[in-house]
Image (cartoon, rainbow, N blue to C red):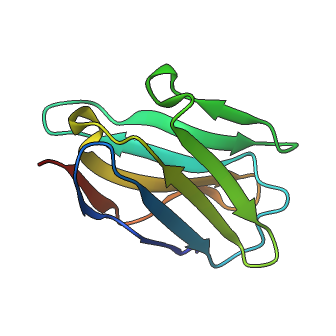
């Protein structure tokens, strides 16, 4: 069973920055998808940013130019650098890993609150 451990959430003022980390218990080199999704109260879970097979990246339009996803394969960790945060970025952020051997796994979620 895959374990995903997230960290880095918190409270930040508008315009501020946070970096989220997601450490996996398995090798992340040959994953199909690994990245970040978020869910705000009353909303469906949505893609924020993710790596796909081969190392390509996908971003939600709402975060392009502000958020950057990166990874350290040796550390089995994916990061999400979030800059110029807005109140509408407030949500629980979940890490997701999808791979052929392991199926789909989700982290426990980390709260990000953007407020003055």
Residue that appears at 48% across and 34% down: 47
**Which quadrant of the rendered structure holds the N terminus?**
bottom right
- The image quadrant that residue 3 belongs to is bottom right
* Residue at the extreme front of the image, as rendered: 15
On the rendered structure, is 52 left or right of 58?
A: right
Please tell me which residue is depicted at 62% across the width and 42% down the height of the picture.
Answer: 50
Name which quarter of the figure residue 54 lies in: top right
Disc tally is 0
Left or right of 36 in this view: 112: left
Q: Position of residue 94 (x, y in %)?
A: 41, 54
Q: Position of residue 33 (x, y in %)?
A: 68, 45
Looking at the image, the residue that sits furthest to the top is: 61
The vertical placement of 108 against 39, above or below, is below
Would you say 20 lies left or right of 26 here? left
Report x, y in % for residue 7. Answer: 42, 72
Q: Residue at x 73, y 78 (%)?
A: 75
**Where 5 falls versus 87 (above or below)?**
below
* Residue 16 spot, x, y in % from top left: 34, 51
Q: Looking at the image, which residue is at 28% across and 36% down? A: 86
Judge whether 62 appears above or below 8 on screen.
Answer: above
The answer to whether residue 44 is above or below residue 7 is: above
Q: Nearer the viewer, residue 98 or 56?
A: 56
């Amino acid at each position: 069973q895959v374990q995903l451990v997230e960290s880095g959430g918190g409270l930040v003022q508008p315009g501020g920055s946070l970096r989220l980390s997601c450490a996996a218990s398995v090798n992340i080199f040959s994953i199909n998808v690994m990245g970040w999704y978020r869910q705000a109260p009353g909303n469906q879970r949505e893609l924020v940013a993710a790596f796909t097979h081969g190392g390509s990246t996908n971003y939600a339009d709402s975060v392009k130019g502000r958020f950057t996803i990166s990874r350290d394969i040796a550390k089995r960790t994916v990061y999400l650098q979030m800059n110029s945060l807005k109140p509408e970025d407030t949500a629980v952020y979940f890490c997701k890993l999808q791979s052929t051997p392991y199926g789909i796994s989700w982290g426990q979620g980390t709260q990000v609150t953007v407020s003055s």
